[in-house]
Image (cartoon, rainbow, N blue to C red):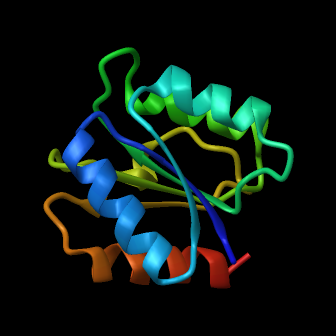
Amino acid sequence: MPRILVVDDEPALLRLLETFLSRVGHHVTCCGTGGAGLLALDSSESGFDIAVLDHWLPDMTGMELLDGVLLRAPGMPVLISSGSLMEIGSLQLPETARIAFLPKPYVPKMLCDQIDLLLAHP
């Protein structure tokens, strides 16, 4: 059962994602701020298999959060989601980083498909 860290500042979306991802067999930890997400990474005994990060958060940008995630778990795949378009290829990322982008709004099936793709290609 993959362990997923979801960081988003929209409480309704967090509840929806937690419910949906749990129903399809994932273990989900949800956080409403970037700081809470980094704390979850730091305090998790078993770690996470993938992170799903919102690009706009109240306490830091998605890129600051992404930097913190990659520092703590360099090999972990990350899915960034935002209502704003962004080009992942233009980011300064380590060669080993596995990063994908999912534009909002999306349906939960689209999220699952992206998660499966990132987890399937190490």
Image position of 19 (left or right of 103): right
Image position of 21 (left or right of 58): right
Q: Position of residue 110 (x, y in %)?
A: 30, 79
Residue appearing at x 19%, y 50% in the figure: 85
Q: Position of residue 13 (x, y in %)?
A: 24, 52
Relative to 108, say whether 31 is above or below.
above
Q: Position of residue 81 (x, y in %)?
A: 32, 52
Q: How many marks?
A: 0
Residue appearing at x 86%, y 44% in the figure: 45
Residue appearing at x 25%, y 40% in the figure: 11
Q: Is residue 64 visible?
A: no
Relative to 17, say whether 37 is above or below.
above
Residue 39: which quarter of the image?
top right
Image position of 44 (left or right of 52): right
Relative to 36, say whether 16 is above or below.
below
Q: Nearer the viewer, residue 112 or 15?
A: 15
State the quadrant of the N terminus: bottom right
Residue 25: which quarter of the image?
bottom right
State the quadrant of the C terminus: bottom right
